[in-house]
Image: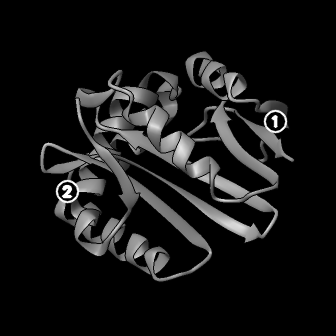
Amino acid sequence: MQFTVRGARSEDLSEMYAISVAAHQAGYGSFIPLEEKERFNQRYTLSEEGELRYVSSMQAKLNDPEWLFWVAEGEGKVLGYTLAQRESDTVLHKKGMFVHPKYQGEGVGSALFKASLGGIDHGEIDLVVIASNQRAKHIYQKSGFEIRGLAQKSFYGAPQEVMALIKH
């Protein structure tokens, strides 16, 4: 499959919302404890209200120079996206990467991940991952990330770990 990675634009936000919902349901649903499942499903089910909230929040971030967004585009649509927040010239916090389930395994996530690592030239890039998500942790470890410890917050009851990469 052919696709390109580029900076996100305002007109991508509705497609990004739909990808976020689909990717969360497909990728994280099995990690959420039963007692949090209903709250998770309320947040990650397509709705007009959810889309308005998402678009408003992401539009504010698109307009903020601290935030970096990349989308993978192919077949005339957004296939996935990733975002990061730059704390300084040497600290970058990856805040998520979401690929529509239909396009997973096509290299979209790898291309987005690689693009986001270019957010700083040297310093530390960190991210938070669900502790039991061995697949994601393996991918991050192959890219040089190391586990630093438990995160302070859980994701809908699922414990998370902080991973970091030092770029020289």
**77 in relation to 100, above or below:** below
Determine the secondary structure under disc 1. strand
Q: CA distance from mark 2 to mark 1?
A: 32 Å
Q: Which residue is mark 2?
A: 47
Question: Which residue: 56% across, 70% down?
Answer: 67
* Spot occupied by residue 144 in the image (x, y as percentages of width and height): 76, 30
Percent from the top left, x then y, of residue 159? 69, 32
Identify the residue at horizontal 75%, vertical 69% (top origin).
87
Residue at position x 48%, y 25% in the image: 34
- Residue 37, compared with residue 95, is above or below; it is above
Q: Report the coloring of the rendering.
A: one colour
Question: What kind of residue is marked 1?
Answer: Leu
Give percent across and percent down for residue 55: 31, 70
Taking the image as shown, residue 2 lies to the left or right of residue 39, namely: left
- Crowd rating for badge 2 (residues with CA inside 10 Å; few <14, some 14–19, many 20+): some
Give the side of residue 140 with respect to residue 115, left or right. right
Location of mark 1 (residue): 150
Check the image and report above or below for 6 versus 112. below
**Amino acid beneath label 2:** Ser
Q: Nearer the viewer, residue 44 or 148?
A: 148
> At 69% from the left edge and 56% from the top edge, which residue is drawn?
93
Quadrant of the rendered image containing residue 127: top right
Q: Position of residue 118 (x, y in %)?
A: 63, 53
Give the structural element (helix, strand or loop) at label 2.
Answer: loop
Q: Which mark is residue 33?
A: none
